[in-house]
Amino acid sequence: MAKQVIEASQAVAEAVKLCSPSVIATYPITPQTHIVEHIADFVSNGDFDAEIIDTESEHSSMSACIGAQGTGVRTFTATASQGLALMHEMLFVASGMRLPIVMAVANRALSAPINIWNDHQDSISERDSGWIQLYVESSQEAFDTIIQAYKIAENKNVLLPVMVCLDGFTLSHVWEPVEIAKQSKVNSFLPKYNPIHAFLDPKKPITQGPVSYPDTYMHFKKMQHDAMKESIDIIKKVNSEFRGKFKRGYGDGLIELYRMNDADYALIGMGTLCSTARVVIDNLRKEGIKAGMIKVKTYRPFPSEAISKAAKGLKGIAVIDRDISTGYEGALYSDTRSALCDGKSEVGTISGFITGLGGRDITPQHIEKALKDMIFGKGTKEDWLF
Amino acid sequence: MTMKDKINNLSTEEYFASGHRACAGCAQSLAVRHVLKASGKNTIVANATGCLEVFSTPYPQTAWRIPWIHAAFETAASVASGVDKALVQQNKRDKINLLAFAGDGGTFDIGLQALSGAAERRHKFTFVCYDNGAYMNCLSLDSLIMTKDGLKRITDIQLGQEVYAFDQKTGDLALKRCTGIFDNGIKGVFELNTLHHTIKATSNHPFLVLKRDGRGKPHCFIWKELGHIKENDVVVVLKKTRPGKSFEFKPIKISKKGDYKVNKINNLTLPKKSSEDFMEFLGLYLGDGWIRPQKAETGFALPKNTKESNRLIYLYKRSFKQNLIQKDKNYIYIYSINLSRFIDSLGFGRGAKNKIIPDWVFTLTDSEKEAFITGLMSSDGYKIGNSNRYVSASYDLLRTLRLLLQTIGYQVGKIHQQTKKKGTFCVYRNLLEDSTYGYICFSKKRIADISKYPSQTKQRDFLADNEHFSTEKVTSIKFVKDEPTLDLRVEEEHNFVADGIVVHNTGVQRSGATPKYAETTTTPFGKKIHGKTEFRKNMPFIMASHGCYVATANAAFPHDLISKVKKALTKDSVSYIQVFVPCIPGWGIPSNLSIEIAKLAFKTNMYPMFEIEDGVVRITNRPSKASPIEEFLSPQGRFKHLTKEEIAELQANVDSEWNRLVKLDDAQIRIF
């Protein structure tokens, strides 16, 4: 099928339509709004049979998704920044009730000072909420990842909600050629939703969301954690199945490698900055520096084994964070370092860089500086690149 | 026509199973049961976080026989929105009744936004608000409470009984009526010790603590929760009660010669009221005596020709107008069915390890109490200098003796307990088994001469010049264990004397639905502010202005509630039903009165029953004659402190709200 030049927000909306969720809860927030606007267009034109609930807050959007998914139908919602922060309470409820909700997050900085532009602080702040987090680099990847997300979330060994994170403006508002899959093909990849534990049916009454005492609570949390770990294999499987069907894939579904075969140094990052990094790496190669990139697509569960394997024997790694764990260092940097402390990877230097907060452009120069600082031993664990 | 059909076509099916963990007398659980009967089997419930969710779904059990979902405190309406639309997509919307349940917090306060949004989006479900509110704190079950009728276990306190309290304005000892007793379930209990007192209470139970305000400023007392009290904090304790009077004994059945199975009669005259001689006799008896009513035997372990046995013979003659001759070398025996029965009737019939000082002894005159203690001391007591020591195997006896001594101005140290191993040589013989006994030391309290060094004396004991109370430093606080707890509510002063220490009665926290002037721990009754200062939100009108069908109902009138739920479920948008459900612990009412109080709310127009349909108000039930609101307020501890003016203000508010409803009902015009 021919490619269409569309906005990434529309690509997400098209993918959502193809996955046919029954209930979509919406509340506008920049830069996510275009996604739900496109979906609303589809529904009002009769192209998409779904119920839209225009709630009065993101908190209620997530609650409505919990209610609908708990009734036994597929759901979708999208948000960003303050909206995601307002949902915080309900994110834990959704994952704790093991409801396979899919949500798009158009990443945006958190207030204060208020700022509508991109960084990863909003979704990184929800990394412990029990949601699977997938970060995407391009419109096509956003489109493909939404479809994969439903398949991952609804797998009976996973049953966890999935957040698909795309950079606000730098991706959400960018027009790119996207190949939109055929409905029949999506249907053959993603079967009809068949709830096995979450449904409200008077014929078979169940109680969802009971109170759990100290004797059981911890067991629920352990099961949730085990399911999250289990999802590592499922994400890989879904990615390769997707590649078989649609002839596109993103690494092993967890991480994607760029020029890593003979690399001495690697850059680790997430989202659109990886596109810029590809150009920088090509240029460094021309200078004779053997650089490569490990793009982290799946941030939760954290693919520590895959990263450790890919980084084995590297002389140095530069981790770029578009977030800051205030008072410490970048979250991706912390996770990477702990993953590489497994005694197997034998990596030389690991440096961390904070950049691109609140929509600050990440230019090729930023990335080149990060890599070179690391290579020439000037990197620390949290260098701020303004 | 079957019985089933007669009553509102009610199903005999139960959709809310019994065996859940609601308080006895919980009105909310009754209302839930009736609401579900109205909506029937094909019902889905979206529930907000609250006591309903907690007591009905402790994993892995559930009381819900219909599909039920709970997410968070403020999300009953938003979760129901999602369920509503999912049902539309499943083509099941017309077949299923959807209900959203929340308490008044999940409706009036944190849940209001989601409810307003859902109403505006015209989702199809019925939102039921169970309108109640509040939480509380308590004492251990073996707490001993100082009452007008003597020392009582907290479990034996009756409603209306007068208990001793600390008058916070005058510092005087006051008698106040107990207006509520609550069972608060099993909670963690802590033991607080001062030099002369010990009490067990939950960590949130308030005590009266001295607050020193520094040089030049007056000291004052504040209520502090046990969990916030530290060692060396100073609490208010009882020093001395007012002298009582002689106790008149209840007559017992007197057996005569010739009665069935009666052969030991010994014609003695039983005293009609207490006297110093008789109390000293009982003191000696409590230490060294026993009764075996089945053998008509009363005995004393007193060897012949000792000071104690001679004293007993003297006291016996004075008390029973009869001579007593000791025949045995080591024991004194009296065979009289009437005497042993009489001693038993006075509460002195317990075995050595369970001995206790009966409550009536606490109401005697000071000299009778002193005589009783003299008797006790001549049995198992001895003197070391100015200090007296009393030994007993009964912990309860020591505990009650300690409190008795404190009512007549003795200072008493803590109860020391010791265990002697089997085989230890003790009192002329080897012990046959491990033996635990305890002792207390006491001495007359020195009266501080406050005129001489006023500030120093006051520094040591802020209440030094107070006749009835003094202050003592807290020496230790430690966790004991989880055990059943109770609490009392006391009129006006809201405090009482438990185990000799002044403690506060229960508390309640303010919610958006708390009525004006209701006392809560977050809106306490103070000199300046009397309870909650605002009237309730008018939620029914707020919801009616969203264009909803609105009805108020009352747990005491289930058929009305059922009809209103049935009507609400026929509507195509959000309907709102607000049910009045008294809360046993929250409102400080006995568990058998919740429906009575609910009825009073209706009879006094405190909680009018009306509906608003298509914007038109209609009163559904009217009391034949409205009662004054005191009838609703007075059984509830939370309104105890109201002044006449405040009651009048509340009455005026109830009247004006009611008159507005009546006018709207008369006019029958669309107002929303």
Image: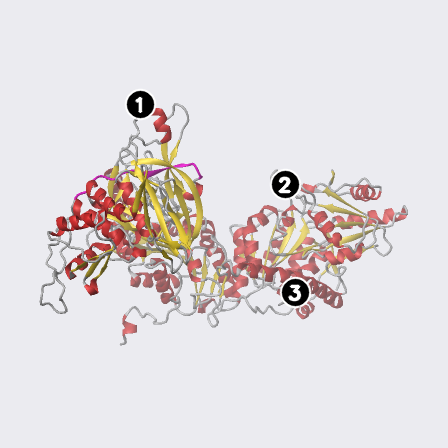
Q: Is residue B234 magenta?
A: yes
Our reading of the magenta stretch's main secondary structure is: loop
Q: Looking at the picture, tell me which residue is in the foreground, B213 or B1.
A: B213
Q: Is residue B408 left or right of residue A345?
A: left
Q: Spot the residue most to the bottom.
A: B1
* Mark 1 surroundings: few (<14), some (14-19) or many (≥20) residues within 10 A: few
Q: Which residues are magenta?
A: B230-245
Q: Amino acid at mark 3?
A: Lys
Query: Relative to the observer, which residue lies in front, A191 or A31?
Result: A191
Give the CA separation, mark 2 to mark 1: 72 Å
What colour scheme has been applied to the protein in the rendered image? Answer: secondary structure
Q: Chain of mark 1?
A: B
Disc 1 versus disc 3: nearer the observer: 1
Q: Residue at x 30, y 51 (%)?
A: B397
Residue that badge 1 annotates: B452
Q: Position of residue B69 (x, y in %)?
A: 48, 62
- Residue B412's x, y, as percent? 33, 41
Question: How far is disc 1 from disc 3 in space, using C-alphas?
Answer: 88 Å
Q: Are marks 1 and 3 in contact (CB under 8 Å)?
A: no
Tag shown at residue A115: 2
Q: What residue did someone put label 3 on?
A: A151
Q: Given this view, does label 2 or label 1 mark the residue nearer the observer?
A: 1
Q: Residues within 10 Å of mark 2 (few under 14, many from 20)?
A: some
Residue B170 found in image quarter: top left
Q: Position of residue B632 (x, y in %)?
A: 25, 49
Q: Are marks 2 and 1 on the same chain?
A: no
**What chain letter is assigned to the residue under label 3?**
A
- Is residue B485 magenta-colored? no
